[in-house]
Image: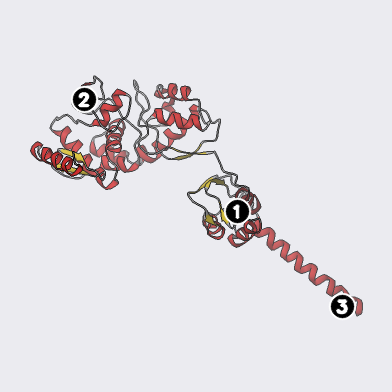
Amino acid sequence: MKRLLIAGVIALPLLVLGALGVWFYLQTRPFSSAFQPQLVRLREPMDADALAERLAARKLVRNPRLLAWWVKRHGKAQITAGDYEFSPNQSLFEIADILIYERFTRNWVTIPEGWTIARIAERLHERGVVDKEEFLALCQQPQRFKDIGMPLPENLHLEGYLFPSTYRLPPGTGAEQAIRTMLNTTRQQVYLRYKDAMQQRGLSLHELLTIASMIEKEVLHDDERPRVASVIYNRLKINMPLQIDATVLYGIGSWKERVLYKDLKHPSPYNTYLNRGLPLGPIANPGLASVRAALQPEQTEYLFYVAQANGYHRFSRTYEEHLRAIREIRTARGE
């Protein structure tokens, strides 16, 4: 009887330890076996508990309290700001190590709305994703990518067709793969999603992207995009030159804050002061807000707009109203 009692006393802690070990294993094992890398971007330092909850909500860890306890035990009560990459096939300890040792990722690249292919090439080159010259050369060969499954220009470049987003493009990805990734996103986010809407408006994909790109470069605030779109359509309807400064600058090949009168005379198929109708093609790569505005413009009678100091515009129906708006804005600026 005494031996049984001793055996029981020894066995109980072992059982507890065993159960604790099983629990610990279950709480720390990967959420799944799938490699599905996710970007977690911290713009500023974040409390370990708050970040752990965020990772749990994204199904990256099973036990946020355990993760927070572990990283704090290693001196990381505050997680350093930066870009991190996690996948649900990583264990809690693998994820913790990334945070503890500040293993920032270079696998993700953000392409903002309104960037040109030249600027995109610079960013990807800086990050070691592509060779800049190869990237630009391939952008001049759109038919190389005709298997993508959406209309691409035949005698132009891919300006406007590279969707602005945050992409997983590790260093060494290469120009062709990077371009294919962005084209496929345009196919999914624009062409397939808005194919019916384009047909209803009688727009080709090229025309849609061209209009959206002008809106993108002209407008700072999303709520104004449909109104600027209405001006573009109103002018096209009466065959009035669009007179959009951003197209002139694109044709010149450089960007500046103020367009001079001599710039307006620069001969280019993108100069919408000299040429009526749409320019030859997109002047930048537009985001979804501009695409939606091009498909759903406001119904107005406006033909003119002029920028104000706050980035918004004054809209006018007649040239006389437009001139008055210009004078008032200049007076307000002290010009």
| Closest to the observer, 297 or 216 | 216
Mark 3 residue element: helix
Point out which mark residue 173 bears: none
User: Percent position (x, y) of residue 246?
Assistant: 27, 31
User: Which color scheme did the rendering employ for the protein?
Assistant: secondary structure
Residue drawn at point x = 56 percent, y = 30 percent: 172
Q: Reply above or below: 198 against 53.
A: above
Sequence-wise first label, 2 or 1? 1
Q: Residue at label 3?
A: 5
Q: Residue at label 2?
A: 264
Q: Which of labels 2 and 3 is toward the front? A: 2
Marks 3/1: CA–CA distance: 41 Å
Q: Residue at label 1?
A: 31
| Closest to the observer, 10 or 193 | 10
Residue drawn at point x = 88 percent, y = 75 percent: 6
Sequence-wise first label, 2 or 3? 3
Q: Residues within 10 Å of mark 2 (few under 14, many from 20)?
A: many
Mark 1 residue element: loop
Quadrant (top left, top right, bottom left, bottom right) of the N terminus = bottom right
